Amino acid sequence: MEGFDYSKIEEHKIYDILRPLGKFVNRTQYKIEYIGTENIPAEGGFILASNHMCALDPLFIAIGMKKRQLHFMGKKELFENKMIRWFLSTVNGFPIVRGGADSEAMNYAIRIVKEGKILGIFPEGTRSKDHKPAKAKSGVAVIAKEAHSDILPVSIYSSDDMKKHTKLTIRFGNIIRFEELGLNDDSTRTEIKDAAAFVMDKIIELWEMGHCE
């Protein structure tokens, strides 16, 4: 996409500087409980896959990851404004054309993982209108296949349809090893779809746990 530099992958100091602001937004808007943060690998590249509830989901997840930065993709329309593009880029966001073949963005996503960083992705491809996990698209498995990546499943749960000042539970599951996906360099389209569905099933299992009592 014009205006975004796909040639290099960086992690910016401003990301860490803005963490306190993100925590403040979280506290004022929602009551968030994080479960399973010990499952976040301390090093190495992998994919973090979560269900998608609202526009603030990357922020919700990132604040729970105290020691590592998260890279995430967003629809290209968000990056058309210069100021918004600058801000999203400095917090590791990058644009992708939804519903189409965007090889430049996909290659960038694969490189993020191969270079030892964390790629955040919402397998559903868009926000859920009823706030319940939906069917996964193939993208998460395509990237995993090309990067030979493990996947960390995450669920965002709300019992109040994401209304402000209500409780959210963000649950980090056990890492899914690449070998569990049943993928290889010669995987068929059906096998890739099955792998994406497998990842989404793990996310749904976490989501169905609901809030901690």
Image (cartoon, rainbow, N blue to C red):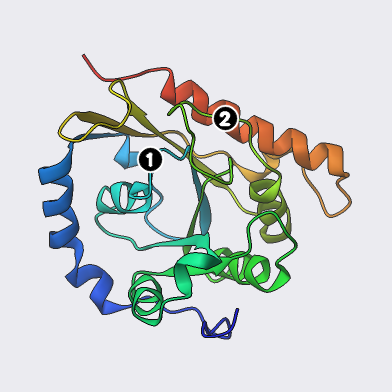
Residue 103 found in image quarter: bottom right
Compared to 36, does 21 lie above or below? below
At x 56%, y 63%, the residue is 113
The nearer-to-camera label among 1 and 2 is: 2
The x and y percentages for residue 114 are 59, 67
Residue 116 visible (yes or no): no
Q: Nearer the viewer, residue 72 or 178?
A: 72
Q: Nearer the viewer, residue 22 or 127?
A: 127
At x 13%, y 60%, the residue is 20
For the C terminus, which image quadrant?
A: top left
Q: Nearer the viewer, residue 44 or 71?
A: 71
> What residue is shown with label 1?
39
Q: Earlier in the sequence, mark 1 or mark 2?
A: 1
At x 56%, y 38%, the residue is 176
Q: Nearer the viewer, residue 22 or 166?
A: 166
The x and y percentages for residue 140 are 63, 48
Q: Number of callouts in the render?
A: 2
Amino acid type shown at disc 1: Asn
What is the number of the mark on residue 134? 2
In the picture, measured across the screen, residue 104 lies left or right of residue 45, that is: right
Compared to 61, does 32 lie above or below? above
In the picture, measured across the screen, residue 58 lies left or right of residue 104, that is: left
**Secondary element at tag 1:** helix
Question: Mark 1–mark 2 contact, CB under 8 Å?
Answer: no
At x 58%, y 84%, the residue is 2
